[in-house]
Amino acid sequence: MHASFSQVIRSMTQETNLNTLKARFRGYFPVVIDVETAGFNSQTDALLEICAVTLKMDEDGWLSPDKTIHFHVSPFEGANLVKEALEFNGIKDPFSPLRGAVEEEHALKEIFKLIRKEQKAAGCQRSIMVAHNANFDHSFVMAASERSHLKRNPFHPFATFDTAALSGLAFGQTVLAKACQTAAIPFDNREAHSALYDTERTAELFCEIVNKWKKLGGWPIFSADEESEQSADE
């Protein structure tokens, strides 16, 4: 049997409603984050750079990067600076005025303000951090937020989307550079370990994974009853 006009319209409406950030991520607003730090301990080591990229979804359900906000950050008072970490990320002098660094509180306030605005516009209830090896970035953002006594932190307190794990599933790679290369996303190793560059590449990678799942037929997801009803109408 052929599907009726009303059934076709209902199916199209349902799919359209599902092609929103709110529906796609169960009310969460995904925000891509990367940080550069002076060590591995979020409680004692300095946060030196942070970038956030918000995401948007078009009416057909395709995900893409949207707005970018980026800051160099001054070490908090008494922060530990690990020499090897500074050599790794190329920040030779965290106190150099040439960095144009701002205090943690200022950087996070501006980032959180943008996120809350975009989250509200998307109709989402809370933001969720997307990052490569996300536990690391999440711990530094949460520690800095606590040090700055910020009460309106938009991020979920522990849940994240980890692109290292997702890339392992989608592309068989867990290193950011190799995952991007496998996904045909240009990656310049000379630019790596800059929060701005790494966040932009991570955002592209996350969008590619989400869109790839959609291309393979994994989204929208319909219930068994809906699929049976659709089959009966064909």
Image (spheres, rainbow, N blue to C red):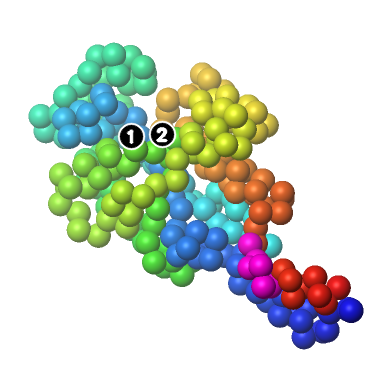
Q: What SS does tag 1 mark?
A: helix
User: Can residue 31 be seen at all in this image of the molecule?
Assistant: yes
Work out which residue is located at the far right of the displayed protein and give it.
1
Residue 223 counted in the magenta span: yes
What amino acid is labelled 2 in the image?
A: Asn
Q: Are marks 1 and 2 in contact (CB under 8 Å)?
A: yes
Q: Please give the residue where the numbered disc 2 appears in the rendered image.
A: 133
Where residue 101 sits in the image (x, y, percent)? 28, 35
Which of the 4 quarters of the picture holds residue 58? bottom right
Crowding at mark 2 (Cα within 10 Å: few <14, some 14-19, many 20+): some
Q: Residue at x 32, y 42 (%)?
A: 138
What amino acid is labelled 1 in the image?
A: Phe
Q: Pick the residue in front: 124 or 200.
A: 124
Where residue 148 sits in the image (x, y, percent)? 17, 47
Q: Residue at x 33, y 34 (%)?
A: 136
Which of the 4 quarters of the picture holds residue 1? bottom right
How far apart marks 1 and 2 lie (CA) works out to 6 Å
> Is residue 133 shown left or right of residue 141?
right
Q: Pick the residue in front: 50 or 94.
A: 50
Where residue 206 sits in the image (x, y, percent)? 55, 43
- Write down the region rendered in magenta: 221-226
Task: Count up the numbered dots.
Answer: 2
Q: Residue at x 17, y 34 (%)?
A: 43
Q: What SS does tag 2 mark?
A: loop
Q: Please give the residue where the numbered disc 1 appears in the rendered image.
A: 136
In the rendered view, tell whether residue 103 sits above or below residue 57. Answer: above
In the rendered view, tell whether residue 83 sits above or below residue 51. Answer: above
> Is residue 87 shown left or right of residue 30?
left
User: Can residue 199 be seen at all in this image of the molecule?
Assistant: no
Where residue 139 sits in the image (x, y, percent)? 28, 39
